[in-house]
Amino acid sequence: MARNFFLRRRQILRSLYEKAASVLSNHHPPIILAKFDADDEANKYLAKQYRIRGYPTVKIFRNGGQMIQEYRDSRRADYIVEYLKEQISPASVEIKSAEDSSGIIPQNKITIDFNVEAIEKFFGEVLGL
């Protein structure tokens, strides 16, 4: 019975990863989502090299594999897609007007006004000036 549970779980996760991989392959530039069976004898060396000890293990490889991070968030396809898209987006974007911010700053994010007056007021209050 437990074996059937794990087989079904693997099938569900395989389907979710395939869906995410399909979406990400159409991204510009493409984001590659790859998988391998760590239990397969031919892949044991990869499992050992990347310290894969359980199923499912999801790793993110950056800079040609020089930086490796384990992904521990949701396994839902839409979460994986959004997370990886965020990872390749620029760390910052210059916004010069309210119109520039349209579509860049989601409604649930905090925005800070960094004009000179705001900065002076902030530091004045913090430093007691």
Image (cartoon, grey):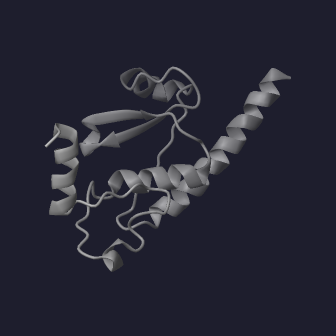
- At a point 48% along the width and 28% down the height, the residue shown is 42
- Does residue 84 appear to the left or right of 64 in the view shown? right
Where residue 64 appears, as percent x and y from the top left, is 25, 43
Where residue 59 appears, as percent x and y from the top left, is 43, 36
Say which quarter of the image contains residue 2: top right
- At a point 17% along the width and 46% down the height, the residue shown is 124
Say which quarter of the image contains residue 97: bottom left
> Is residue 80 placed above or below 94 in the rendered structure?
above
Residue that lies at the very extreme toward the bottom in this rendered image: 99
- Does residue 53 appear to the left or right of 129 in the view shown? right
- At a point 55% along the width and 50% down the height, the residue shown is 79
Residue 32 visible in the shown view: no
Residue 122 visible in the shown view: yes
Nearer to the camera, 7 or 24 = 24
| Quadrant where the image shows the C terminus | top left
- At a point 86% along the width and 23% down the height, the residue shown is 1
